[in-house]
Amino acid sequence: MSNSLRVRIAPSPTGAIHLGLARTALFNWAYARGREGQFVLRLEDTDRARSTRESELAIIEGLRWLGLDWDEGPELGGDFGPYRQSERIDRHRQLVGGLMETGHAYACFCTSERLSEVRERQQAANETPRYDRCCRDMPSEEAQARVASGDAFAIRFKVPPGQTAFQDLVRKDVTFENSEIDDWVMVRQSGDPTYNFVVVCDDADMDITHVLRGEEHLVNTPKQVLLYAALGVDAPIFAHLPLLLGKGRKKLSKRDGGVSLSDYRDQGYPREAILNFLCMQGWALDGETDVFDLATFVEHFDLADVSRGGAIFDFDKFLWLAGEYLHKEADEVLAEHCLPFVVGEGLFDEADLRARWDWFLRVIAMEKERIRIYSELPARMAYLAAQNDQVEYLPKAEKGARKHEDRAQTLTDYLAWLPEHCSDSASEQAEATKAWLVERGQKIPMLFQPLRCALTGLPGGPDLFEIMHLLGQAATLDRIRSGVERLA
């Protein structure tokens, strides 16, 4: 085994990169980067029916978007390639042949019908369903003759008696009774190798020293440790990471919210917030600090500090954390991040916004503290794109405006007063308007609530006079005029 630390992720390209894979990739990447190790990407694409090039590209693009670079992989190459499992089939066949020669594996000729019957009998007797080892002690001459005659067969691993123990950096020392381990299938009757077989072959050939993966793989580990021993190579050190759990401490699912990385990227969660939140799924910096960068994570990350219990995925906290990162962005950067979402909602076209970039930056500055993810901006500024006589009045906004009996007259009078008292300063405009209300003996809400409804259709929001400056004088007057009619 290599003297330098080598870790890997080995996703199956059968769908989008999900949060569990993203967290596992992040922990592997950080573990390697903090210890001068290598981080390897290998694609387990032997499921020919489900593996697609589209999914492969989605995984690669998703990891790159997160900024998790790898040292060896399908697109990059390396000394231990190829890095697609489907391209290593000849090596897998070579190794399974060697295991049969040494007596660590055997041919199983049991049909699916017989296996079903055995399983049903065991279940009826309240026994744990497992293979009854019917073919395990078949004389080699008989097995060879059946193979030669064309009988279909699978290849099973011959589990020895005793116990299997391994070191786990999260769960400490783990021991399994071999009597509880089935003689599992290494190669199906179709000739396709199974996960537990090829993952060991590839990890051994690629000199992987540490395997960091999800807790769901813990039950596979004793099978794999036995296979390493049969191959005559040292097993890597394992670390089984806690499951990501949703509501009710059940495994995270789509019903809890988005489960794929693209769900959150497409909703406009800042990349740094996603990384920060994934860091905390089973690990904590100091028990108090929630906001920290990737460099801090790499510096402090230690598998000894990873929790054994499931990591509760708190969506409210995730959204809060997204806002913390968004609010720290420079207005220019935030504008670029929000632009695709505003354009995507059809509020403005990109050329229009870029031609009015200073105006858009003023919108950003005004709404920045009120949004948490980029996709929230379009709804916040939709009124700015509306036709002046078609602003949508939300029921709460209209109700607030209509509780003032003199609303129409107040707006009419303000409409007459405003053109001669416009100011280039929002604060000066606000002070002048308040002075006008004092002269009339009116309280601020008597104008401000109907005015906000007329201008935005919303019950609350940013400073009214900042909004008036963004709308411009002509649009402001048109909307007030329309408001007089609609709120009469």
Image (spheres, rainbow, N blue to C red):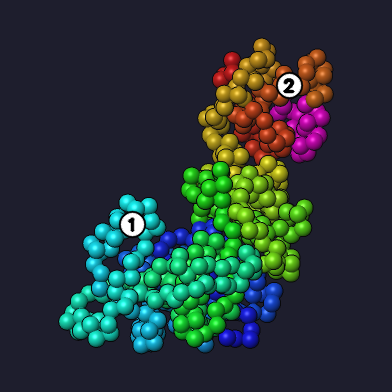
371 up-or-down from 52: above or below: above
- Where 74 sits versus 312, above or below? below
Quadrant, the C terminus:
top right
Give the residue pinned by disc 2. Answer: 445
Main SS of residues in magenta: helix
Image position, residue 371 (x, y; %)? 65, 44
* Residue 75 makes an appearance in the image: no
How far separated are the C-alphas under marks 2 and 1? 77 Å
204 vs 295, nearest the viewer:
204
Residue at (45%, 65%) from the top-left corner? 180
* Residue 247 coordinates in the image, percent (x, y): 56, 44
Total numbered circles: 2
* Residue ranking furthest to the left: 149
Specify whether 356 is left or right of 225.
right
Residue 432 lies within the magenta run: yes
Along the line of sight, the residue nearer the viewer: 239 or 50:
239
Q: Residue at x 25, y 81 (%)?
A: 143
> Which residue sits at x=42%, y=70%?
195
Q: Quadrant of residue 153?
A: bottom left
Please name whichever residue, 488 or 197, is drawn nearer the observer in this view of the structure.
197
Q: Which residues are magenta?
A: 414-433
In this rendering, would 146 be left or right of 370? left
Residue visible at 20% across and 76% down in the picture: 151
Q: Is residue 464 visible?
A: yes
Per the image, the residue denoted by label 1 is 122
Q: Earlier in the sequence, mark 2 or mark 1?
A: 1
